[in-house]
Amino acid sequence: MLHLEALRDAITERVRPVPALTPLRPSPSAESAGTSRAGTSAGSAAVGVPGEAVPLEARAPVAWRRVVTQAAAMWLATRIAYALFTYFAVLFQHSGPVTEFTPFVPHALLASWQRWDAEWYIRIAQRGYWNDQPTAFFPLYPLLIKATTFVIGQHWLLAAMLVSNLGALLALIGVGLLAAHEDSSEAAAYRAIRVAVAYPLAFFLVAPYTEGLFLGFAALSLYSARRGLWRGAALWAFLAGLTRPTSVVLVPALAWEFGRQQGWWMRVGQWLGRARQRAAWAALPQRLRVWAQPDLWRAGWYTMRIWWRDDAAWRQPSWWWQGRWRTAPRVRALIAAVGTIGAAPAAIALYMAFLGLRFGHPLLWLHVQRIFWRRDAMPIISSVGGAIGQVFDMPPWTYWQARELVDLAPVLIFGLLTLLSVRRMPFAFTLYMVGLLYLAISTPVLDSPDPDMLISAGRFLVVAAPIFVLLGRWTERRPWLDLLLVSGGFLVQAILAAFFFAYGWLI
């Protein structure tokens, strides 16, 4: 009985029902009213506590044009900065008696971004899936590269860079819209975007990788779900499923958000309350239950007689048809739930069907990860503990100790931030982050000559949009934190990007 009561209280505390499910569609007047945070009542109309406490209809409409403009401006500024960085980093790396006067054409400078997984994506775009090894890479990004070459010609690397950087623009727009919606402020969008681009491994949003596309699809899916736009949430989740297998982290987040807005979890809490009452009834002594039972039956009998006499509508011939129409909203809600929650798994299933037809093995992409990349499932306690042990076992101030910290430090920091922000951000975001962290550390690289178990874990966390929203919110009143995250992040990012240019082990 006590366990049921505690579970009911926990769910009731997390769930806050949404009275209206009509999606917010900002009118021109409302949008213009929300373009300035100061001097307007749009931001003050929402509840002060961010996250679940603000229902959909109480939030100010997002001035999406201003958010898109801010994201585009930040994207353009960072692309110019990356172009300058590429120019000086490549030329200074190749300085020497022979190469001091050797010219590097723009194509040679651009080729410095074609490293590691980028070569696989470009080769898949050129040749398709020629054997089982490239099946570890999902098809949407190579398909977009192939489609871009029909416009710009057979410039494969340039096409890959265009697709990945346009995906980065979509990612910044998605993060900005998500932050602006959660905090009902345009300034929040700018802060979150700035934190996102300053993440030390955010140069993968420039390289020919899928991080930009996936971050954009995931952020827009979460944003659409928070706004109650379920078709949009399903569309973005489906595209994310065609981009990366890690799109499964969207499933619990979208399921929770849909159930919350439909009031499902509130009804679960009520059911647990009734279960607690039944457990309390069963705990009564036998004599008390026998004594109380006739009164309950008598009250139920009187209620049935009054209902039969006063309301006989159910006995009308059309009662069954009217009841069917009353269940139509529930059917529509069920269809919307299946479409939203099952969008990402449907995309993965579509790719698996292709692999079944092409190679006769739908799960080939999973086996390839284990055979060629030596990734195998491991309990997260063992993988994190093993990675921490490796860091302390390495000789201090060595290359491999620093290299392991590139992946381990983001996992530990983002995990701590997720735990600290359970009550500070929507529970759907918490589910997304828990799933993302689990996938980043649950399949370490084993039996490898390199000692880094959590290889690529830091890159996987580039798509942690809720953490960027949270950190952007914290920098509003903490200028020192903003300076640390932005300046320190860009400084470390430049060092790691230069290491990436030199074919350093960053994948």
Image (cartoon, rainbow, N blue to C red):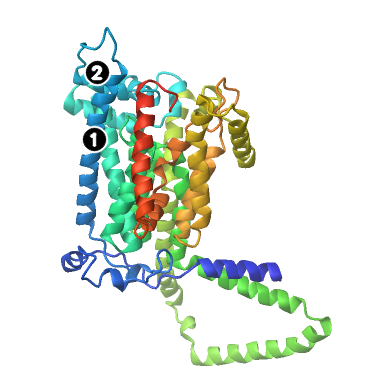
Please tell me which of labels 2 and 1 falls first in the chain: 1
Quarter holding the C terminus is top left
Asked which secondary structure carries label 1, the reply is helix
Quarter of the image where the N terminus is located: bottom right
Instruction: Indicate whether 345 appears above or below 10.
Output: above
169 vs 332: above or below: above
Q: Which mark is residue 81?
A: 1
- How much space separates mark 2 and mark 1, taking CA atoms? 18 Å
491 to the left or right of 409: left
Q: Is mark 2 on a helix, strand or loop?
A: helix
Q: Residue at x 44, y 52 (%)?
A: 341
Q: Which amino acid does label 2 sit on?
A: Ala
In the image, residue 305 lies at what x, y percent? Answer: 59, 91
Identify the residue shown where x is 49% and y is 62%: 423
User: In the rendered image, which residue does mark 2 sit on?
Assistant: 108
342 or 51, nearer to the observer: 51
